Amino acid sequence: MLLWHSMAFAQSAPMDLAESNGCERSFHIETKTADLALIEFAKQAKLTVIFPYNKVKTSIANPLLGQHCSEQAIELLLRDTGLIGQFNHSGVLTIKTLADIEAQTAEYFCQDRAVIQ
């Protein structure tokens, strides 16, 4: 794990195309702080996960046990934590807080807009 400007980066071996297309993996992650759970998730899912360490370290992730595709697994792991995972086209998973997403959305809609009459 590398820490850089309060962002954590957890990387495992790159997943192949079949794995990125929803194939299920076996997960065994006990209840723990979200930062530790996300590092373990990255290892078990063989994904790169980027997250804001200072914003996730106080959240408690849910246990994740059994066979799941990565998209379903991250939803279960982060359910009711105020955190959300977003996969990009390369399969990299970025974790954001719901508060940050809401603030970005509000900022976008509150910017001055030209009015056409």
Image (tube, rainbow, N blue to C red):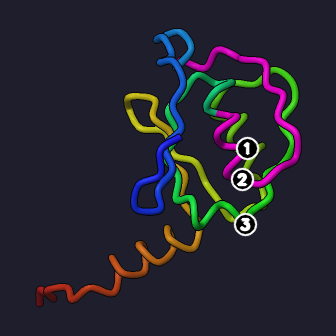
- Tell me the residue that label 2 is attached to: 34
The circle on residue 58 is 3
**Mark 1–mark 2 CB contact (< 8 Å):** yes
| Crowd rating for badge 1 (residues with CA inside 10 Å; few <14, some 14–19, many 20+) | many
**Mark 3–mark 1 CB contact (< 8 Å):** no
Q: Quadrant of residue 19?
A: top right
Q: Quadrant of residue 43?
A: top right
The residue stretch that appears in magenta = 21-41
Residue occupying the point 52% across, 59% down: 52
> Mark 3 or mark 2, which has the lower sequence index?
2
Residue nearest the observer in this picture, 110 or 7: 7
| Crowd rating for badge 3 (residues with CA inside 10 Å; few <14, some 14–19, many 20+) | few
Residue occupying the point 41% across, 55% down: 4
Residue nearest the observer in this picture, 89 or 55: 55
Query: How far apart are the two marked residues, 3 and 2, measured between alpha carbons?
Result: 7 Å
Helix, strand or loop at disc 3?
Answer: loop
Q: Give the image location of residue 93, x and y in percent.
A: 51, 40
Image position of 32 with respect to 87: above or below: below
Helix, strand or loop at disc 2?
Answer: helix
Residue nearest the observer in this picture, 35 or 75: 35
Image position of 8 with respect to 107: above or below: above
**Mark 3–mark 2 CB contact (< 8 Å):** no
Is residue 35 within the magenta segment? Answer: yes
Q: Give the image location of residue 114, x and y in percent.
A: 14, 86
Location of the C terminus (image quadrant):
bottom left
Q: Amino acid at mark 3?
A: Thr
Q: Give the image location of residue 74, x and y in percent.
A: 68, 40
Q: Amino acid at mark 2?
A: Ala
Is residue 56 within the magenta segment? Answer: no
